[in-house]
Image (cartoon, rainbow, N blue to C red):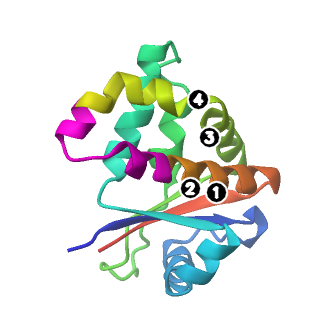
Amino acid sequence: MSIYLHFRAVGESEIRDDHTWLAAFMSDAWDRHSDEYAAGITWSINKGWDSVNDLYAAADALGTDADGPWTLPIYGGRPVPHSADADPSDPPLMLLEPAGVSQAAHFLATVSFDELWNVVGARFSALGWSREELLDHHRGLQGLYGRAASTGHAVAKAVWA
């Protein structure tokens, strides 16, 4: 079974702070995933997003502030709560506002993947992760957040099963 964390850049003025609306928006984006991926406005991670977050948490060992921007790329943002009339099968949603997107983009652009890998690589390899898989996710997130930050966009996140 696949479970994806789906990231989608979105103009702040386009967003409605409504779970039902955002779930429909993200569902439409998921249906167009290959086109949006090619356009550089989406990224997704199958099952391993917690490991990508753990990779970024290694920034603490490099001297990064524990409450710093390494927390933003995966789990950063605020939950968008279900409304009383929402479909209970709608996915969990988060929204990272443009200021947080800029902080995440800066972190991803300046952190050394090689230094992070040096801290956690042996443990991750033992868990079956390859350096190349994590580097691919890192580069994908770098691109997505970099483009979103340069246009002042937010990033919406949904979990799809």
Quadrant (top left, top right, bottom left, bottom right) of the N terminus:
bottom left
Whether the magenta-drawn stretch holds residue 132 is answered as yes
Determine the main secondary structure of the stretch shown in magenta: helix
Tag 2: residue type? Gly
Q: Position of residue 7 (x, y in %)?
A: 53, 63
Question: What crowding class fits label 1: few (fewer than 14 Cα within 10 Å), some (14-19), or many (20 or more)?
Answer: many
On the image, the x and y values in percent for residue 57 come to 41, 29
Q: Would you place residue 35 above or below residue 92 in this image?
A: below
Residue designated by label 4: 111
- Near mark 4 (Cα within 10 A), the count class, few <14, some 14-19 or many ≥20, is some
Label 4: which secondary element: loop
Asked whether the beta carbons under mark 1 and mark 2 sit within 8 Å of each other, the answer is: yes
**Residue at 62%, 40% in the rendered image:** 104
Give the label, 3 or 1, closer to the camera.
Answer: 1
Do callouts 3 and 1 mark residues in contact (Cβ within 8 Å)? no
Q: Which residues are magenta?
A: 123-137
Q: Earlier in the sequence, mark 3 or mark 2?
A: 3
Tell me if mark 3 has few (under 14), some (14-19) or many (20+) residues whose alpha carbon lies within 10 angstroms of its own.
Answer: many
Mark 1 vs mark 2: in front: 2
Q: Which mark is residue 42?
A: none
Where is mark 3, residue-wise?
A: 104
The residue at 72%/56% (across/down) is 148
Callouts 4 and 3 close, C-beta under 8 Å: no
**Residue at label 2?**
140
Q: Amino acid at mark 1?
A: Leu
Q: Earlier in the sequence, mark 4 or mark 1?
A: 4
Distance between the Cα atoms at labels 1 and 2?
A: 6 Å
- Name the residue type under label 4: Val
Q: Earlier in the sequence, mark 2 or mark 4?
A: 4
123 displayed left or right of 102:
left
Q: Which residue is mark 1?
A: 144
